Image (cartoon, grey):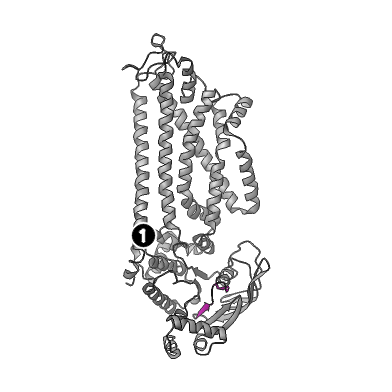
């Protein structure tokens, strides 16, 4: 076997890279574990809470945090902790769904623009640009104005203005990749373009997509809360963090816990997802600089 | 047998290559030498259908194709389906997210093999390039450069092509690995009788490998001679200078007779 001496050459660089791959793998596993644990805690919360999110209790209106009501009760006597739990499903879950749909749409548009010729590229990217021209808030307010304020309309608005970043990223990265030698080899080996996209392009842009996705996930949580706070999003009596802030606003002087806890929930969640995205980006970036 | 008659490449009115002709008998090796920018790599790209080229006639056993003018878009190799291409940088030529086995298997994609058949073909190709079977599950970043280049060679071999193009296959590697892989290439050619077209800077390597030499300079053919004759009586002043330079650098033996011995 003549391979033995081949080994020493790039061993050091390889070791570094392997170490890095392990870091990334470990990080992704930690994220997965973290999500499972927080999901489990939230599920346990749903299971153990003795209160319903929308059941009023007029004897206990605006009571401060206590052992009965950990985060106090609101103006109708509803348990704030329970409402935060249910509201989290709206805020975090809807944002997850919106960004997922946005990511899939944007990826499809970006891949199509990057690989189906100049005409497709120009058409799709000008379309993307014109969508970029609408600020999120304005688009959502307009749609709410035309179709009426509701959760579905807000989701529609956020999906409409949320996919373009993905399209741009995917188009750029995949055009860059298309000139790489391994894509040329795949073409010379007669692979059909869908298989080249699936096996060669997508796996190599996946990490960057994941970073952008965590970023827009947290932004989307803020958008949902912001729109609900303005009254264009999730409608009462449904609990949502932004909507809870809105209804607590009137009691800021007498019952500040009505705004503190939803505010903290938004802060902690967005901060966590952002930090997660930052760390992910660092790992992805340093990995790509090694392999260049 | 591959023969190319008066191949020219013109890209937006710049002539990259002008009327290059050569022919190689089956199972022989053509080495293409020349300085950077002389059009060596463009010639390979044109022969693989990646850039448009004109030619009077290009015939390749068993297929013959008439003059084809490519338009800007990639249309696939003209009549050279039984050819494969090994590139210079093995790391760039392998998908970093795909195992070596999967990459090698893609070489046989056009044969539409079943899963088991493909595994068998990949194992055979790994054996041909002297890589342990266990490497099939590794990623390109987890093996050495030499092993990665062997994997690229395996990907080329797995479809059992008549013709293999090499674009500076050894220049990314260090001297010992170069020697080992050159030996592997020789063994493969002896076993399967593939025709090799090798672009190289290294005249020392060419002297031990080539049956036919093609030297390009500024997009023109400077020499096209049998290798033995090329090293004894180069066709032009420029070729003599090239050989002298290689001797001075020590990649060719000083005595022309020794270069002769190295050549089979």
**Quick check: A41 above or below A25?**
above
In the image, residue B239 above or below residue A74:
below
Which quarter of the image is occupied by the N terminus of chain B? bottom right
Residue A80 position, x and y percent, is 40, 20
Where residue A277 sits: x, y (%)? 43, 41
Determine if the magenta segment contains residue B36: yes
| Vertical comparison of A10 with A206: above or below | below
Dividing the picture into quarters, in which one does residue A155 lie? top right
Q: Is residue A234 visible?
A: no
Residue at horizontal 44 percent and vertical 29 percent from the top: A266
- Tally the marks: 1
Label 1 crowd bin: few (<14), some (14–19), many (20+), radius 10 Å: some
Q: Mark 1 sits on what residue?
A: A14
Rendering coords of residue B189 (x, y %)? 44, 77
Where are the magenta residues, as a range? B29-40
Q: Position of residue A161 (x, y in %)?
A: 57, 36
Residue A275, image quadrant: top left
Identity of the residue drawn at 47% across and 47% down: A208
Which residue sits at x=49%, y=80%?
B27
């Amino acid at each position: 076997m003549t391979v033995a001496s081949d080994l020493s050459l790039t061993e050091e660089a390889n070791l570094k890279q392997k170490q890095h791959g392990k870091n990334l793998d470990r990080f992704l596993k930690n994220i997965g574990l973290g999500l499972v644990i927080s999901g489990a805690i939230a599920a346990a919360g749903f299971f153990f809470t003795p209160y319903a999110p929308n059941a009023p209790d007029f004897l206990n209106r605006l009571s401060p945090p206590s052992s009965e009501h950990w985060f106090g009760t609101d103006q109708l006597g509803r348990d704030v902790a329970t409402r935060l739990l249910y509201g989290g499903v709206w805020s975090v879950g809807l944002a997850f769904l919106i960004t997922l749909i946005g990511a899939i749409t944007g990826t499809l548009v970006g891949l199509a623009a990057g690989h189906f010729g100049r005409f497709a590229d120009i058409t799709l990217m000008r379309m993307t640009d014109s969508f970029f021209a609408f600020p999120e808030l304005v688009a959502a307010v307009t749609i709410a104005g035309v179709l009426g304020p509701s959760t579905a309309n807000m989701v529609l608005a956020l999906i409409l203005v949320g996919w373009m970043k993905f399209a741009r990223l995917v188009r750029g990265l995949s055009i860059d990749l298309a000139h790489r030698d391994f894509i040329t080899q795949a073409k010379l080996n007669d692979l059909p373009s869908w298989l080249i996209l699936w096996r060669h392009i997508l796996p190599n842009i996946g990490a960057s997509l994941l970073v952008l996705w965590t970023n827009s996930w947290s932004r989307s949580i803020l958008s949902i809360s912001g729109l609900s706070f303005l009254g264009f999003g999730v409608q009462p009596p449904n609990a949502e963090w932004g909507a809870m802030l809105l209804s607590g606003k009137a009691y800021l002087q007498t019952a500040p816990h009505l705004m503190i806890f939803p505010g903290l929930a938004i802060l902690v969640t967005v901060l966590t997802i952002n930090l997660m995205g930052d760390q992910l980006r660092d790992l992805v970036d340093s990995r790509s600089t090694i392999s260049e | 047998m591959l023969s190319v008659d008066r191949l020219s490449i013109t890209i937006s009115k710049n002539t990259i290559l002008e009327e290059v002709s050569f022919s190689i008998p089956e199972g022989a090796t053509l080495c293409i030498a020349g300085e950077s920018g002389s059009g060596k790599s463009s010639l390979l790209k044109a022969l693989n259908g990646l850039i448009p080229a004109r030619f009077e006639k290009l015939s390749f056993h068993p297929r013959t194709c008439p003059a084809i003018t490519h338009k800007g878009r990639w249309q696939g190799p003209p009549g050279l389906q039984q050819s494969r291409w090994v590139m210079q940088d093995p790391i760039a030529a392998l998908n970093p997210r795909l195992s070596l086995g999967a990459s090698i298997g893609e070489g046989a994609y056009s044969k539409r093999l079943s899963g088991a058949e493909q595994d068998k073909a990949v194992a055979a190709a790994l054996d041909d390039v002297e890589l342990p079977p266990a490497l099939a599950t590794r990623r390109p970043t987890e093996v050495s450069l030499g092993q990665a280049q062997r994997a690229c060679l395996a990907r080329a071999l797995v479809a059992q092509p008549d013709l293999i193009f090499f674009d500076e296959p050894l220049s990314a590697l260090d001297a010992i690995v170069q020697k080992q892989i050159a030996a592997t290439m020789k063994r493969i050619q002896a076993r399967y009788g593939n025709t090799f077209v090798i672009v190289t800077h290294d005249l020392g390597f060419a002297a031990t490998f080539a049956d036919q030499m093609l030297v390009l300079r500024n997009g023109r053919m400077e020499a096209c001679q049998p290798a033995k004759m090329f090293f004894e009586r180069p066709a032009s002043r420029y070729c003599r200078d090239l050989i002298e330079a290689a001797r001075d650098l020590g990649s060719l033996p000083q005595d022309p007779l020794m270069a002769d011995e190295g050549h089979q």
